[in-house]
Image (cartoon, helix red, strand yellow):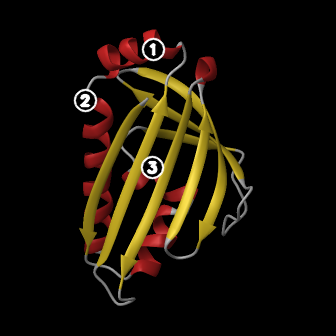
Amino acid sequence: MSLVHEKITIEAPPQRVWETVMDPNRLGEWVTIHRAIRDMPPQPPKAGATMEQVLQVRGFRFHVHWTLVSVEEPTAAEWEGRGPAHSRARIRYQLSGDGQGPTEFDYTNEFSPPGGRLGSVASRMIVGAASAREAHNSLTRLKALLERD
């Protein structure tokens, strides 16, 4: 399993950050590896909502089927994903702030590649530090998007 944890402070109220990160239509504005969404969940998404996302890492496109397993608007959400070859992911969003801004956005991504230990070793060799770099770049884009509006 690989674990990526990033934090960023965004000069915007938590509700505005929440509305942006929870809107699948806006993923392309800030998630660097996002390519498309299929089977859009109803808005606002509730626990149990599902969607299929097309992602691209190092030139390889793949689909992830996401289920929103928990949601506490506007402070916390957790998505579970199933990807190719029985890979799994879990993404957590945790937002905190006084309601006016700034907002502390805490992002965690756990990824379990297929193939047990061998798969984990291969994943580290193929993906390397790309996951952490892309998470950092995505949160930087989110910050820029919300602070310029």
Residue 69 x, y percent position in the rendering: 66, 54
* Mark 3 residue element: helix
- Spatial CA distance of label 1 from label 3 is 32 Å
Residue 87 x, y percent position in the rendering: 57, 25
Mark 1 residue type: Arg
Q: Are marks 2 and 1 in contact (CB under 8 Å)?
A: no
Front residue of 26 and 63: 63
- Mark 2 or 1 closer to N-term? 1
Looking at the rendering, which quadrant does residue 56 occupy? top left
Left or right of residue 79: residue 27: left
Residue hosting label 3: 28
Mark 2 or 1: the one toward you: 1
Looking at the rendering, which quadrant does residue 16 occupy? bottom left
Q: Residues within 10 Å of mark 2 (few under 14, many from 20)?
A: few
Residue hosting label 2: 129
Looking at the rendering, which quadrant does residue 124 occupy? top left
- Mark 1 or 3 closer to N-term? 3
Residue hosting label 1: 117
Q: Residues within 10 Å of mark 3 (few under 14, many from 20)?
A: some
- Mark 2 or 3 closer to N-term? 3
Left or right of residue 3: residue 36: right
Q: Residue at x 31, y 84 (%)?
A: 101
- Spatial CA distance of label 2 from label 3 is 21 Å
